[in-house]
Image: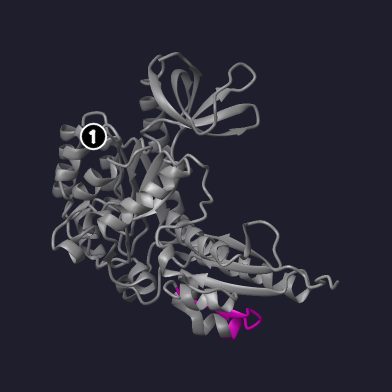
Amino acid sequence: MRTKTLKKNKINVVTLGCSKNVYDSEVLMGQLRANNKEVAHEEEGNVVVINTCGFIANAKEESVNTILEYVQKKEAGDVDKVFVTGCLSERYKPDLEKEIPNVDEYFGTSDLPNLLKALGADYKHELIGERLTTTPKNYAYLKIAEGCDRPCSFCAIPLMRGKHRSKPIEELVSESEKLAAKGVKELILIAQDLTYYGLDLYKKRNLAELLEALVKVEGIEWIRLHYAFPTGFPVDVLEVMKREPKVCNYIDIPLQHISDAILKSMRRGTTKAKTTQLLEDFRTAVPGMAIRTTLIVGYPGESEEDFNTLKEWVGEMRFERLGCFTYSHEENTHAYSLTDDVPEDIKQERANEIMELQSQISWELNQEKVGKTFRCIIDRKEGNHFVGRTEFDSPDVDNEVLIDASQHYVKIGEFVNIEITEASDFDLYGVPVKP
């Protein structure tokens, strides 16, 4: 009897960048598993697939460093093959092939069938909606659209992801049912732009209708909205959010800036007055909702006055959640023709000022939660604490609720009522209470 002496191929998928890349890696891994391939996420493997990010300078640098790290491993004989996919590869393939030729092959963002072929697998159409999830078992990302039609001056996403393409409602419902069957309780809806959902397929903004369909999926208890664009936001979504307990009172709406001059140069299609009104509409329609936003400082031409306008506005709006980034001058974007005239140290100083202000706002808002009880989902155990979240918090980017594991036991992946006993600027501490 002959025994196989060939080394069994194990494919290690490494994911960089945003949740949309996490989703793409999960789809790739689902396809590989269906082809009877041994596949792992960020573990050991003799074949490596790096899913890269090419959004801003820091992300590109991390992607390039990761590629170089695995190429060195290949040269040392620790891995056999290195494949690169994702946004960086889509955007800079010719340059990468020239600069880092020791990668076996580069693939773009919509090259999944060819990537699978290179890995000795076939693309299976019947697997639509099947994924090998890499997140904790209780939540999963649901990508409802790909690409973006917005003309924002600073953004390279349309270069890497193409035009906006919505997925049909029935396909998303089917995918959600499969996730629920695996124990997923929370869906985090992602896209480059949720606001645009449905315009291409249904000739109208259809996010509210999609939510109406998803709340009917048995087993799904929370549905969270990420990355909604402010211009043209479909207000019927707010009615669904208020009416349907499964739709979290939470929205992630990247606003980027508030000075009219900067908004105009950024080609955001809105003004300070319109944006402020939109947020007031949100809070009137859904009292107590958590609004997360992201801002960019140091955009070309951002004066001290523009920055002060932004800072004052952040103080007035008191966002529940906020992230702030320094401007990254990206080639082939509209803003690249402008002079990147704000020095790096000033950019960083401005970002720090915004985050310092937000830290104080967050601390004050968190103090208001002390003594109150919230329904929390428990994501994991870390050190001496169980780590959970309220409906007002998204994984990885928002507040966490910490429960002392030496004093209390809660089940990971389940909902628990937690009374908040103390709070810092970005963390809540609590104890489980009976419903």
Residue, x 28% and y 40% (percent of image)? 215
Is most of the magenta stretch helix, strand or loop? loop
Q: Which residue occupies the extreme right position in the image?
A: 1
The quarter holding residue 6 reads bottom right
Q: Which residues are magenta?
A: 98-108
Residue at horizontal 62 percent and vertical 65 percent from the top: 37
Relative depth, front residue between 284 and 419:
419
List x then y, in percent, for residue 273.
Answer: 14, 47
Q: Is residue 427 above or below residue 212?
A: above
Question: How many neighbours does mark 1 have within 10 angstroms: few (below 14), some (14-19), or many (20 or more)?
Answer: some
| Front position in the image: 36 or 238 | 36
On screen, residue 128 versus residue 97, left or right, reads left
Give the residue drawn at x 45%, y 34%.
399
> Where's residue 231, x and y in %?
18, 55
- Camera-nearest residue between 185 and 425: 185
Q: Quadrant of residue 376?
A: top left
Residue 342, x across and y down, in percent:
39, 62
Magenta-span inclusion, residue 375:
no
Pointer 1: what residue? 244
Secondary element under disc 1, as helix, strand or loop, is loop
- Identify whether 56 is placed above or below 107: above
Question: How many tags in the picture?
Answer: 1
